[in-house]
Amino acid sequence: MLEVISTTKNKKYKYIKSLLQKKMRQSEGVYTVEGRKSVCDAIESGCDILLIAVSESYFKEYGSNNGYESIIVKDELFGGLCDTKTPQGIIAVIGVPKTDNISISQDKLYVYCDNIQDPGNLGTIIRTADAAGLGGVMLSEGCADAYSPKTVRSSMGSFFNIDIITDFSHDRLFSLKDKGFALVSGALTPDAKLYTNTDFTKPTVIIIGNEANGVSEDILNNSEHIIIPIYGKAESLNAGVAASIIMYEAVKQRRDN
């Protein structure tokens, strides 16, 4: 018989609700995923599912998830656990994967997010990197939280399909240059060359900078600079859009080579 939560004072309820806060996700080493499709994607991807909470209505329609610790939450309380305005009635608590042993392969392309602040942009970059078949997404220290509900939701399931390496320092990035990787930054600098005129067939890390300030100066000093031309009156492109354009150009070159 599954436990039915009927009060916000319940320990499990309070625990799941606390994970809406970044500091709690970090201290506990867990994050949450909302919605039927996202939870199913997490299960199919072999994520470390620690707990699943479902609303009464969801339970009546779909039942419980066999094999995982589950609880039922009263309908009127369930929304308090969620970041979305219209919850689907299911949320999972998942252990953050270990990234210490992820190997960086010279055969693959990577994208490095340098202090990206918007979770939507970060989720878009993760989703595009997955779609384009990149080797992984590297996040600098100070990036938006990779495990925030908004980032996970924006990735549309790609979050579970590609390696995401957080707290990837600039020094660690520069060490890849010493190992033969080209570091290529999107930048509005006088020496920037057209992105289509850049050779992406060699081992490459594509660097996308902060939405307001661009790529950090120390990275600019240690990387090639590329630019996406703007033919209209817009001052710049959204970081997620710019990353997508560059990633697909890089993949096209590799497929054509």
Image (cartoon, rainbow, N blue to C red):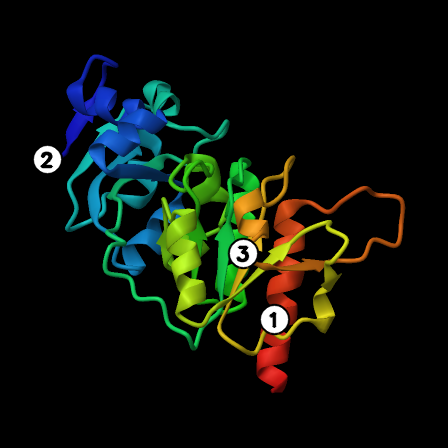
Residue 80 appears in view: yes
Q: Position of residue 29 (x, y in %)?
A: 23, 38
In the displayed structure, does residue 42 sit left or right of residue 107? Answer: left
Residue sitting farthest toward the left = 1
Upstream in the sequence, badge 2 or badge 3?
2
Q: Are marks 1 and 3 in contact (CB under 8 Å)?
A: no
- Real-space CA distance between mark 1 and mark 2, rounded to the nearest whole angstrom: 53 Å
**For mark 1, what is the residue?**
250
Q: Residues within 10 Å of mark 1 (few under 14, many from 20)?
A: many
Tell me where residue 185 sits by quadrant. Answer: bottom right
Q: Nearer the viewer, residue 152 or 126?
A: 126
Say which mark, if any, is on residue 222.
Answer: 3
> Hey, what amino acid is under mark 1?
Ala
Residue 126 appears in view: no
- Real-space CA distance between mark 1 and mark 3, rounded to the nearest whole angstrom: 20 Å
In what quadrant of the picture does the N terminus appear? top left
* Mark in the foreground, 1 or 3: 3
Residue at horizontal 30%, vertical 38%? 31
Of helix, strand and loop, which one carries label 1?
A: helix
